[in-house]
Amino acid sequence: MSRLLRLGILLLLVSCAGGNNSAPRNLDNACSILEQRPKYHAAMKRAERAWGVPVHVQMATIYQESKFIGNAKTPHRFALGIIPMGRQSSAYGYSQALDGTWDDYVKSTRRFGARRNKITDATDFIGWYMDQSEKKLGISKWDATSQYLAYHEGHAGFSRGSHNEKAWLLRVAAEVGARAELYQRQLIACGKL
């Protein structure tokens, strides 16, 4: 096999393999996102049926956590500005779920093959977590702002009110709420809600 043919096959494989982890274009348009990635819509509708978390709330959460990048990781930490010290946390994937919380999800749902970089598993995780937030904390599944605060701080942190001491987090949560409202209006307009 010629080198040129091998190179062409390799490039084709690399371009196909990377597609699931790249972000869709125009992340400010929910309809565009779901048109580009029909599997996202199917996964989010499945999670909505299972857990009752609306598609637009799931989308706003994924936007904030990973910008729809399937293999998203937190940045590296550096000592003295140059010595790598590992990542800031174990958060990974579309949902940026931490190792321990993901393990709790897998045990609770018995989805032992679930992966954080797979959209169907990530949306199911978000649905499961927000369902727990409603049960434990009384947060409506339609309240993207408060759901995000509980998602970011954890149920215990939210109960303690740790978010109230973080102005930056309150601002980010308000942005998640506003994005959820924007996505909801867009999805109604294009008939995907």
Image: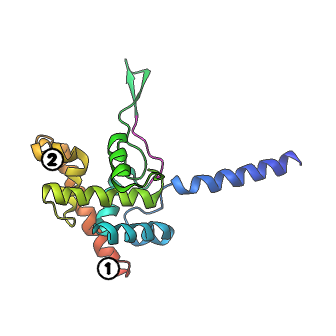
Residue type at the position of mark 1: Ile
Relative to 50, is 148 above or below? above
Residue projecting furthest to the right: 1
Query: Which residue is found at the position 40% from the left and 61% from the top?
Result: 27
Vertical placement of residue 124 versus 168, above or below: below
Q: Position of residue 75 (x, y in %)?
A: 40, 36
- What residue is at 29 percent from the left and 72 percent from the top? 184
Q: Which residues are magenta?
A: 69-75
Q: Residues within 10 Å of mark 1 (few under 14, many from 20)?
A: few
Q: Does residue 22 show up magenta in the picture?
A: no
Identity of the residue drawn at 37% across and 60% down: 124
Q: Position of residue 149 (x, y in %)?
A: 20, 51
Image-based side of 106 in relation to 115, left or right: left
- Whether residue 34 is visible here, answered yes or no, is yes
The amino acid type of the residue labelled 2 equals Phe
**Residue at label 2?**
158
Q: How is the image coloured?
A: rainbow
- Residue for badge 1: 188
SS for callout 2: helix
Q: Nearer the viewer, mark 1 or mark 2?
A: 2
**Real-space Cα separation, disc 1 to disc 2, in angstroms:** 31 Å
- Quick one: quadrant of the C terminus? bottom left
Residue 73 appears in which quarter of the rendering? top left
